[in-house]
Image (tube, grey):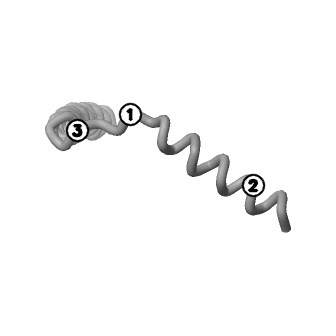
Amino acid sequence: MSKIVQFFKECVAELRKVVWPTRDDVVSSVKVVVVSTIVVAALLGVLDALLVAGINLVF
């Protein structure tokens, strides 16, 4: 049991060393992820539509 307690004490000690991002950093990172996800989804949608149109022309 003492090893488990020691493990959690060490975990807490390590988490205190972490430099957590500010709220502004998190918000800007989320914006980048959302915008890039939308752009990639749009590009894949256009590519899919073009491939479907090309297959429909062949068959």
- How far apart are the alpha carbons under marks 3 and 1? 9 Å
Residue 7, position as x, y percentages in the image: 73, 53
- How far apart are the alpha carbons under marks 2 and 1? 23 Å
* Mark 3 burial class by Cα count in 10 Å: few <14, some 14-19, many 20+: few
Residue 13, position as x, y percentages in the image: 58, 44
**CB within 8 Å, label 3 to label 1:** no
Between residue 36 and residue 55, name the one nearer to us: 36
- Of labels 2 and 1, the one closer to you: 2
**CB within 8 Å, label 2 to label 1:** no
Which quadrant is home to the N terminus?
bottom right
Residue 19, numbered circle: 1
Residue 45, position as x, y percentages in the image: 22, 40
Residue type (three-letter) at the residue carrying disc 1: Val
- Of labels 2 and 3, the one closer to you: 2
Q: Is residue 38 above or below residue 5?
A: above
Mark 2 or 1 closer to N-term? 2
Q: Is residue 46 above or below residue 13?
A: above
* Mark 1 burial class by Cα count in 10 Å: few <14, some 14-19, many 20+: few
Asked if one can make out residue 44 in the rendered structure from this viewpoint, the answer is: yes
Mark 2 or 3 closer to N-term? 2
The residue at 75%/54% (across/down) is 6
The residue at 66%/47% (across/down) is 10
What residue would you read off at disc 2?
Answer: 6
What residue would you read off at disc 3?
Answer: 22
SS type, badge 3 = loop
SS type, badge 2 = helix
Residue type (three-letter) at the residue carrying disc 3: Thr
